[in-house]
């Protein structure tokens, strides 16, 4: 099926959508993005994604391409047009183009930001095979830039990290900086030891996950102990269980780190419990 996508004010078949070759998103990864999941045809935590988008834009001195209400309307229209029951909506705002290539930002008064959205149909997002099996993780060095709290489209290194994992027979990679785990290539990282959930505190070193915020709140509501602190990959390898969170995979159990099996090598009870509670609430609150 040909998707209907949104490009700079127009709804078009994906084959007809075009952006300028001078767009700074294309030339310089001068762009930010969001991925919102869809469950039962409704958007999960749209508000959280809209607020983070606004923050990313502010940090980079980019204008918002439209209002939050208009963004919601575009999301909903694409979900409806493309008949998405479970899946994702990808949104990207670029600094746009003034018709040439230059390191200097174009004048925001005269250059409009670009806005692109498209859907991805994922029929078994909530009931995924991957989540039942759990993920195998390798660790790699974190060589990304220092503003990982801004959700830019500079995804080459995370993409290479996934390829390194694949080459090693694993599913994903956790990145390490100054001896401590930062996060996964496209998710936040956690381990559980003696009933306590440990994850890195928020800073410019990691993306402030929308799923992370929800899962931390739900964990506390479920009377689970949560500790935000720096941790090493060796601590995670010796954990009872581990997991990651992201809008595209929710709570994903981790069963192996750098070849070390966690617990009995199947998804741990706390990861499973959190996935269940998260999905339950996400479905109830989706708009
Ligand atoms: N960290 C990184 C590096 C990511 O790319 C993502 C997902 N885009 C996350 C964490 C998880 O964020 P969220 O829960 O908002 O999807």
Image (cartoon, rainbow, N blue to C red):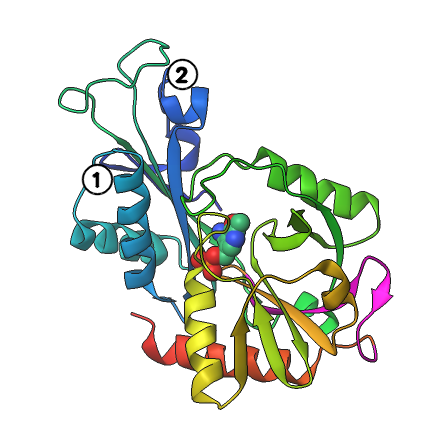
Query: What secondary structure is the magenta-colored segment mainly?
Result: strand
Q: Position of residue 85 (x, y in %)?
A: 44, 66
Please tell me in which quadrant of the rendered image residue 259 appears.
bottom right
Residue in front for this viewpoint, 235 or 153:
235
Residue at image x 41%, y 62%?
210
Q: Can residue 38 be found in the magenta stretch?
A: no
Residue at 50 percent of width and 48 percent of height: 205
Quarter occupied by the C terminus? bottom left
| Disc 1 to disc 2: CB gap under 8 Å | no
Name the residue that disc number 1 marks: 64
- At x 66%, y 49%, the residue is 175
| Residue 107 place in picture, x, y as percent | 19, 19
* Residue 220 in picture, x, y percent from top left: 45, 84
The mark found on residue 21 in the picture is: 2
Does residue 114 appear left or right of residue 235 in this picture? left
The image position of residue 143, as x and y in percent, is 62, 37
Q: Secondary structure at mark 2?
A: loop
| Residue projecting furthest to the left | 109
Cα separation, mark 1 vs mark 2, equals 21 Å
Residue drawn at point x = 73 percent, y = 67 percent: 235
Mark 2 within 8 Å of ligand 1, using the beta carbon: no
């Amino acid at each position: 099926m040909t998707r209907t996508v949104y490009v700079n004010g127009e709804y078009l078949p994906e084959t007809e959508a075009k952006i300028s070759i001078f767009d700074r998103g294309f030339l310089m990864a001068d762009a930010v993005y969001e991925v919102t999941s869809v469950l039962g045809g409704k958007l999960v935590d749209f508000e959280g994604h809209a607020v983070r988008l606004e923050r990313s834009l502010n940090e980079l001195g980019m204008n918002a391409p439209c209002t939050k209400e208009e963004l919601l309307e575009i999301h909903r229209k694409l979900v409806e047009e493309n008949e998405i029951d479970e899946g994702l909506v990808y949104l990207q705002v670029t600094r746009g183009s003034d018709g040439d290539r230059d390191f200097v930002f174009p004048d925001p008064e005269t250059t409009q930001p670009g806005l692109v959205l498209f859907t991805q149909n994922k029929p078994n997002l909530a009931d995924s095979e991957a989540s039942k099996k759990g993920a195998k993780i390798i660790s790699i060095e974190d060589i990304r830039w220092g503003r990982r709290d801004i959700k830019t489209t500079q995804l080459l290194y995370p993409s290479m990290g996934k390829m390194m994992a694949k080459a090693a027979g694993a599913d994903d990679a956790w990145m390490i900086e100054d001896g401590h785990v930062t996060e996964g290539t496209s998710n936040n990282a956690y381990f559980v030891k003696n009933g306590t959930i440990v994850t890195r505190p928020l800073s410019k070193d990691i993306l402030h996950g929308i799923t992370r915020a929800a899962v931390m709140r739900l964990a506390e509501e479920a009377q689970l102990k949560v500790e935000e602190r720096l941790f090493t990959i060796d601590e995670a390898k010796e954990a009872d269980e581990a997991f990651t969170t992201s809008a595209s995979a929710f709570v994903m159990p981790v069963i192996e780190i750098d070849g070390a099996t966690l617990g009995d090598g199947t998804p741990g009870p706390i990861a499973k419990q959190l996935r269940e509670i998260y999905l339950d609430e996400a479905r109830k609150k989706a708009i």
